[in-house]
Amino acid sequence: MGKVKSSRSLIRSIIIAAVMVLIAFGVFIYNATDISHQAVSIRLKLLCDGIYEYRAATGNWPAQTADLAGTAMAARMRFWDDDIRSGRVVVLWPQGWPPNPQDNADKILAYYNKGLISEFGKQWVCWGDLRTEYVSTEKLQALLKTTDDLTARAKNSKLETRNSKLICPPLPSS
């Protein structure tokens, strides 16, 4: 009887330890994913801040990646130009938008297009009023198809989906 009791106790201890390990692993994965989402959201917002900074400094909207090189955003954020050139971040290069971000709340300024965060049917978007939102790929695709004030590059890009992921070609190097 004593051996059965001790083996039950051992099995119970192993099960409790396994459950605790699974819970700890789940918390770790959740926190790592949450940090990734926060990082993408912050990077998008900083990049879009740089677009408005350029607009405020020159009176014109930037038309290419090189235009943003002189902004404070470029000094603060490493690899911002690679994000755009590689297609990780797609900027819609506004032209003719009002200079006040609040007037552009219904327009997409940029979106995150690659990586594991974008593989699960949702993508980060930075709206014209500088708020970021995690939207479904279908919603983003519909918004991009109905947006009438995109630059020629965005208008002419072939939007397609592959495995439910929005594919948009990267900008040519400037």
Image (cartoon, grey):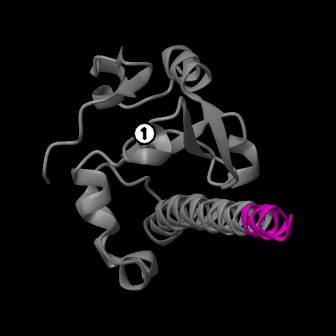
Magenta run includes residue 64: no
Q: Amino acid at mark 1?
A: Leu
Mark 1 residue crowding within 10 angstroms, few (<14) / some (14–19) / many (20+): many
Q: Residue at x 58, y 59 (%)?
A: 33
Q: Which residue is mark 1?
A: 92
Where residue 8 appears, as percent x and y from the top left, is 80, 61
User: Residue 107: which quarter of the image?
Assistant: top right
Q: Quadrant of the N terminus?
A: bottom right
From where the camera sits, is residue 165 visible? yes
User: Residue 168: which quarter of the image?
Assistant: top left
Magenta run includes residue 2: yes
Where residue 147 appears, as percent x and y from the top left, is 54, 21
Q: Residue at x 52, y 34 (%)?
A: 120
Position above or below: 166 against 57: above
Task: Identify the main secondary structure in magenta.
Answer: helix
Position above or below: 167 against 5: above
User: Residue 81: which quarter of the image?
Assistant: bottom left
Q: What's drawn in magenta, residue-wise?
A: 1-11
